[in-house]
Amino acid sequence: MNQQELDKLVFYNCGPSPMVHAAAKVQREFCRDDQIFSAIDYLTKCGVGICGACASPDGKRICVDGPFMQGTPERPVKL
Ligand code: FES
């Protein structure tokens, strides 16, 4: 792929944390963090942003802030 094609890539990851992080590590070899969207399967309980059970390491709640976020919880992309 040439650079123009690489700039158009977008990756969507969805699944358990180890899988999403492993996939993002490989994807970063080909694109920027803002081209990676990840949804990690955290346990959800209330589903409306009250209990915090689904909070990612950066404090975002998957049930109301997600499910897809740019980058990964360790390397979130600020919009
Ligand atoms: S499930 Fe309760 S805050 Fe997300």
Image (spheres, rainbow, N blue to C red):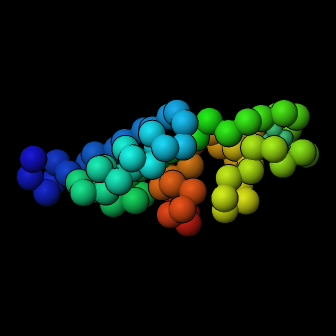
Left or right: 48 in relation to 36 = right
Identify which residue is drawn at 16% across, 48% down. 5
Q: Where, by quadrant of the figure, is residue 39 drawn?
A: top right
The reply, left or right, for residue 57 in relation to residue 74 is right
On the image, the x and y values in percent for residue 1 come to 9, 47
Expressed as whole percent of the image width and height from the top left, the position of residue 18 reads 49, 44
Number of residue marks: 0
Viewed as shown, does residue 4 lie left or right of 76?
A: left
> Would residue 7 be seen by someone viewing this image from the given angle?
no
Say above or below: 34 vs 11: below
The residue furthest right is 50
Q: Nearer the viewer, residue 71 or 8?
A: 71
Q: Tell me where residue 4 sits by quadrant.
A: bottom left
Name which residue lies at 42% across and 58% down: 34
Q: Quadrant of ligand 1?
A: top right
Image location of residue 31, percent across then percent down: 28, 56
Please say if 72 is above or below 43.
below
Residue 37 location (% of width, % of height): 47, 46
Residue 43 seen in this snapshot:
yes
The residue shown at (55%, 66%) is: 78
Q: Quadrant of the C terminus?
A: bottom right
* Image height of 44 relative to 75, above or below: above
Residue positioned 35% across, 53% down in the render? 25
